[in-house]
Image (cartoon, rainbow, N blue to C red):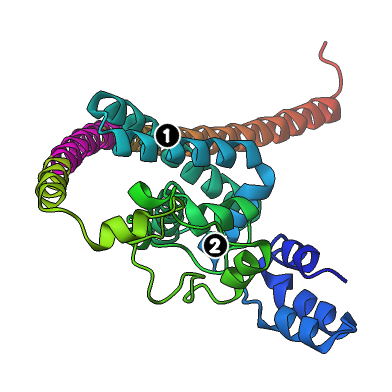
Amino acid sequence: MDFDAVADELYGVPREEFIRTRNARAAEAKDRSLAARIKALRKPTLAAWLVNRLARERPDDLAELAALGQELRTAHEELAGGRLRELSVRRREAVDALTLATREIGRESGLGVSDTVTDQVHATLQAALAGGEAADLVTAGRLATPLDPSDAQQWLTAGTLRHRASEPARAGLAAVPDEPDVPDDAEPDEQPSTRPGTRAKRAQPSRSDRGTTGTTVSAAEVQRRREARQRAEQEAEAARTRRNEAAKTLADAQRRAKEATEEVAELRAKLVKAQRYEKLTRNAVRAAQLELGTAERESDRTERALRRHGPSH
């Protein structure tokens, strides 16, 4: 029995079958260590389960999202403002589209997807853009809990320096998502260099190096803040547009509801009038039937009297 295969199976089954299937696979495991690892896997939350289903039903779309995240990190490193704006629009469109796709998955599965769950899915997809372990977990479809993009923001610019997690480590992240596979003493901006001698140069930078580095960092920070503000303005404008569209949709719906109410009232008035007319006509029918009966009886009576008197001479 292979742990990865079991993990893939568990995070792909319906949520209500997770615990039963997990316990069954743990019982089937011959190795006690493997059984313990399987038993430690946590049942996914609804948001995590929806993203896991997305990874299985639309793997190509998630692969494109991961590639978009790499493009964003490259643009950040190169301080390419125009490219960043273009990619930010693509990022928003991609994340929104995939978030809507998870709502559809939930609907098809007979599950109610609340706004809170939708927000968690959206945040998880945003976190996947940062690359690293977050992207690995999302594309592997082994999430137990939703991800927080704020925890992954440091990967946006340092993702290319961070070591990728091994397959067992990524599976472990699904079981215990609060313990990422990163050394305690490793800071995002202090990753070891792959070039010999670089660590020593960093340890004792020259005065000119320190001055140049300080200036570069300051300029980069200004650029990042400017781009962040631009992104915020773009997102605010998009939010205003969505709000205006929603308000227009609401106004149209209210107008149609009012028209329908008026039409119902008119139809009810016509129904009352028709019911009254029906009652009158039924009364008229009964009166006519009574009159007909009376006339028939009178006709029979006169005919009998005529026969008794015989034919006239």
Residue at x 27%, y 58% (from the top left corner): 202
Q: Amino acid at mark 1?
A: Glu
Closest to the observer: 285 or 125?
Answer: 125
- Few, some or many residues within 10 Å of mark 2 (<14, 14–19, 20+): many
Q: Within 10 angstroms of label 1, few (less than 14), some, or many (20 or more) residues?
A: some
Image x and y of residue 115, in percent: 39, 57
34 sits to left or right of 204: right
Residue 219, compared with residue 252, is above or below; it is below
- Residue numbers of the magenta segment: 223-252
Query: On screen, 73 above or below 152?
Result: above
Residue annotated with mark 2: 48
What residue sits 57% from the left and 61% below the top? 165
Q: Marks 2 and 1: which is nearer the front?
A: 1
Q: Nearer the viewer, residue 201 or 79?
A: 201
Q: Position of residue 209 (x, y in %)?
A: 16, 48
Whether residue 273 is visible to the viewer of this picture, yes or no, is no
Based on the picture, tell me whether residue 232 belongs to the magenta stretch: yes
Which image quadrant: the N terminus? bottom right
In the rendered structure, find residue 63 and report the number of the disc placed on it.
none
Q: CA distance from mark 2 to mark 1?
A: 25 Å
Q: Nearer the viewer, residue 55 or 36?
A: 36
Query: The residue tagged with tag 2: helix, strand or loop?
Result: helix
User: Is residue 122 shown left or right of residue 36?
Assistant: left
List x then y, in percent, for residue 262.
30, 34
Q: In the image, is residue 58 part of the stretch drawn in magenta?
A: no
| Residue occupied by mark 1 | 71
SS assignment for the magenta stretch, majority = helix
In the image shown, does 59 or 37 lie closer to the viewer?
Answer: 37
**Helix, strand or loop at mark 1:** helix
**Residue found at x 48% / y 76%:** 179
- Which quarter of the figure is the C terminus placed in? top right
Rendered image quadrant of residue 33: bottom right
